[in-house]
Image (cartoon, helix red, strand yellow):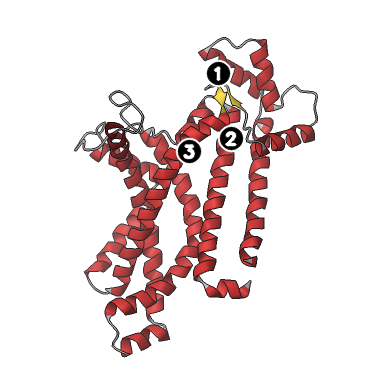
Amino acid sequence: MRALVRRFGVYLLAAWVAVTVSFLLPRVVPGNPVAGAVARASQSGNCNAQCVRAIELQLGYNVHTSLWDQYTQYIGNLLHGDLGHSWSENAPVGSLILSYLPWTLVLLGISTTLAFLGGSAIGTLIAWRRGSWTDWLIPFATFFQALPFFFLGIVLVLVLGQTGTMLKWFPSLFGYDIYATTPGPNLPYIGSVVSHAVLPAATVVLASMAGFILSIRNQVITTMDEDFVLVAQAKGLPGRTVVWYAVRNALLPVVANFTIAISLVVGGQILVEIVFNYPGIGFHLFDALGKLDYPLVQGVFVVITLVVLVANLIADAVYVAIDPRARQAA
């Protein structure tokens, strides 16, 4: 428990740094951020003097309060769940993020779980059958590990997407068929959501699974030479039992590295959402940057950081739970 409390303190510090950076973001950009925001806001409607003043107050521009007072007010608003008001969508940032976040979390959770389970299984097979035909899978894993998420997504769109030039098997734009289905708990909508998520999920799985394959393979090969595995083999235990002994101990370093993998996958998924126009939080972050909607950019940045920190904390808790040495050291 003390190990988790100590790490929780580290994550609180990281969250505070992220919130502070988010606060300073529109206040350190060169030029006049209000002028750009007003110009963008005026394109969608008339932005009068009250609109300009509201934007200035949100960005802390041309106000007579100190930076420290603005910061404390910003922290207070965050603690009350107030992330500001988006002028490009004319809606509270918090409600907008709540509508974007489920798309990202579901896609990220399913894709990362499939990549971890599939990569662990394939990596274990390669390690157990090393020297056989399974070694040919290693170059493919290395190849996919080197591919950027957005590049692999574009390739899948060209090959399998309906907007591509070859097989045209799966939809490749948006999160569902916006022209033929009505959002809600109905089968046509659910089927459309699943079919539209195939290519984004496949991109994340293929690009991230290779790292798990190589990691678990290397760890299992190292563990196979440990004394307890050799003793299990000498006793004549079934091969499945021996593999489980090796994998159970080899998973510990993989789980420890899982926190780094989460950050990389989250960063890659943002690019995947942009490629597929998937209505997650990454795509709307890109859209808000294009519209110079700083309150929405601030809110999305804070939420993405908190999601990554919570995922890392959960991974640390799992590691402490399965590794008694971590509890003993604490």
Indicate which disc residue 251 carries. Answer: none
Is 244 located above or below residue 194 in the figure?
A: below
* Tag 1 secondary structure: helix
Q: How many marks?
A: 3
Is 214 located above or below residue 31 in the figure?
A: below
Which residue, given by chain and number where applicable, does mark 3 sit on? 101
Which image quadrant for residue 186?
top left
Residue in the image at 36% along x and 55% along y: 115
Q: Is residue 230 left or right of residue 86?
A: left
- 305 or 3, nearer to the observer: 3
Which residue, given by chain and number where applicable, does mark 1 sit on? 40
Q: Earlier in the sequence, mark 1 or mark 3?
A: 1
- 289 or 320, nearer to the observer: 320
Indicate which disc residue 299 carries. Answer: 2
Residues packed near mark 1 inside 10 Å, few (<14), some (14 to 19) or many (20 plus): some
| Amino acid beneath label 1 | Arg
Residue at the far left in the pictured view:
167
Which image quadrant for residue 68?
top right
| Amino acid beneath label 2 | Gly
Q: Is residue 227 left or right of residue 87?
A: left
- Of circles 2 and 1, the one toward us is 2
Whether the residues at callouts 2 and 1 have beta carbons within 8 Å, the answer is no
Q: Quadrant of the C terminus?
A: bottom right
| Amino acid beneath label 3 | Leu
Residues packed near mark 2 inside 10 Å, few (<14), some (14 to 19) or many (20 plus): many
